[in-house]
Every structure is written in C-alpha cells, then in structure tokens.
Amino acid sequence: MKKKILITRKLLRSNEDRASKLWDVKLNLNDEIYSSKKLIELSQGCDGILSSLTEKIDEKILSSLPKSIKIISNFAVGFGNVDVEAAKKRNIIVTNTPDVLTDATAEIAMLLILGACRRANEGINWVKKENWKWSADFLIGKQLTGSRLGILGMGRIGRAVAKIAKSFGMEIHYRNRKRLSPDVENGAKYHDSIKSLFSVSDVLSICCPATKETKDIINKETLEYFPTGAIITNVARGDMIDDEAMVQALINRKIYAVGLDVYKGEPKIHREYLKQPNAFILPHLGSATKKTRTAMADLAISNIEEFFDTGKCKNTVN
C-alpha cells in the first residue's frame, strides 16, 4: 500500500508529478496557507508531511498530529518553523534540504550588497519619477573594491558569498562557531568575537543559522561596534535583527544602508523599512530560481523516500 503524504504548499509541476507517482498525496492546488486546525485535519491518515516555512509546526500542533505521522520533510534548508525537540519526543524525524540552495542564496546576498552599496532603491524611485538629472554627485554610493566584507556564519552559503565577493576585490573577514582550516579559509581573516568582526566590517553579510544565541544579534549595543556608515545585509533569518534598533541606526546614519531578504513575521515587515530610502528590500527570494526550487523539492521528496525505504535519512536535523 502506498504511503500517504500531505504536501502543505503547491510545488512546481515536475515535483508534484514525481511525488504523485511515489505516494498517495494530498496536494494544495490553491496554494492556501493552512491554519493550524486545517493542517491537523488534513494530516489525518497520513504517514508524513512535506512542509514549508509558512507552516509553524509547534509543540501544540505536534501533539495533535495523528500517531501515523513519522516524518516532517521541510522544503527549506532552515527548520526554525518546526519544534524539532517536540517532534523528537513524538518520534517524528524532521529533515531539511541543505546544499542545493547555496549558490542561488549567495547570488541574492551579493544582490543585496550591491543594491545597498549603490543606492539601488533610490535609483529605482528616481527613474519612476522621470525627472532625474545627472550630476557629478548624483546618487554617489559605496564601491565594493577594497572594502572589508564581514561574513557572520561561514557555512556553505557564507563561503559561496566570500568566493563571489573576492571577485569584486573585497577583503573577507568572518566569524564562525569554529575556525575553518586554512585551505577552506582561502585567505579570509577569522575573528573570535562578533565585536571584533563587526568593528572591521564595512559591509556585513548575515549567513548564520537562526538559534537562541543569534536572535537579535544585531541590536542597539552591537550596532555601535560597526564603523559609522557600514552596510548590513541579511539572507539568513529575520530574527537576527532588532528592527527598532536597525531603523534608528538608518535614520541617524550610523548605518549607511541595509539589504534585507528576510524579516521577522514575514510577509509582514517593520513598516519603517518601507519609508527608508536606504533600505534595499526583497520578498525572501534567496532560493527563487527554477533550478534551485526544483532541486529543493526533489530533495524534500527524496528525504521522505529514503526514510520509508531505510528507516533513516541523512538530512535529519533532530
């Protein structure tokens, strides 16, 4: 008998076709964001769930899922939307999709850096007005060549950002839980504290996982560590930034500009970002290429397939 799998969000057609051949699937044809109640209702009779970041699967929801649920395969490299410890207590494994979105996310990280440094948001607004006038000092921004890029979190994505940034002539600095070996560092300079890293970061790229330790790591106190006129970008998770403190730093020009692809409470974001001309903001596009989204869904499907075939999965996070 085929396993029954709930797929909580609409996938690309090729991925849905593959899943449908493997299992008896419950598809979300209207791409509705399910309420907790509906998620629990739809999970009845299912053996697994292929979830997305839009589902907050906390301890309360987990305790209400049927005992038949054995795996939650998250369609993302992050898994902060699932209470992994509560899942473990219910003997539900949680998996993610590492590696496949590294390059696409690193590209967006560089787009944020370029957009923030070169005042892209202001430039777009001027073009829309159709009355801009060139002058020697019109929309002068910051050049990447020779500037110091701080990378917070030198994992797969952080290292991919470093590789691209070096081609722009940037000097790479980083903070990581562990120092990388010299061959992996590839000339990047390690810092043993965030204060040390932030103090030399003309530009910061946040690429680290969301944890209790990294929540609001950019706050009123740590913003003072940066050189005046620094630029901060984030492709990790919105929880890393204290938005009130960041907005004030933008207004008083302690921070020259921000480039953001992730936010607390997204799709709703701190309204003040929308008012700041020096905020270059995107709607969580890190992995948004056809190649990457297809690969992510394929891996999420393969995680479920591997688990039911072998009883385990290499991409388990709990």
Image (spheres, rainbow, N blue to C red):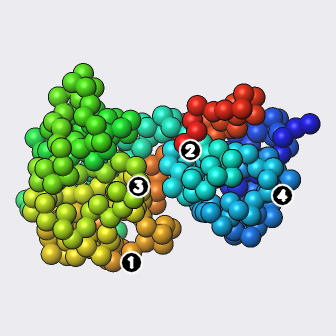
Say what secondary structure mark 2 lies in: loop
* Residue contact at pointers 1 and 2, CB within 8 angstroms: no
Q: Position of residue 109 (x, y in %)?
A: 34, 47
Q: Which residue is mark 1?
A: 271
Q: Is residue 297 visible?
A: no
* Amino acid type, residue under disc 2 in the picture: Asn
Say what secondary structure mark 1 lies in: helix
Q: Earlier in the sequence, mark 1 or mark 2?
A: 1
> Disc 3 to disc 1, how far (Cα)?
25 Å
Q: For the residues carrying marks 3 and 1, which lies nearer the camera in this image? A: 3
Rendered view: 39 above or below 289:
below
Q: Nearer the viewer, residue 36 or 104?
A: 36
> Disc 4 to disc 1, how far (Cα)?
39 Å
> Disc 4 to disc 3, how far (Cα)?
31 Å
Q: Nearer the viewer, residue 173 or 88?
A: 88
Q: Position of residue 280 (x, y in %)?
A: 32, 62
* Residue contact at pointers 4 and 1, CB within 8 angstroms: no
Label ID, residue 318: 2
Label ID, residue 211: 3
Q: Earlier in the sequence, mark 3 or mark 1?
A: 3
* Amino acid type, residue under disc 3 in the picture: Thr
Q: Quadrant of residue 126?
A: bottom left
> Disc 1 to disc 2, how far (Cα)?
35 Å
Q: Position of residue 159 (x, y in %)?
A: 31, 35
Q: Tell me the quarter of the image containing the C terminus.
A: top right
Q: Earlier in the sequence, mark 2 or mark 3?
A: 3
Q: Position of residue 292 (x, y in %)?
A: 53, 39
The crowd level at tag 3 (other Cα within 10 Å; few <14, some 14-19, many 20+) is few
Q: For the residues carrying marks 4 and 1, which lies nearer the camera in this image? A: 4
Q: Which residue is mark 4?
A: 44
Picture residue at 48% right of the left edge, 69% below the top:
265
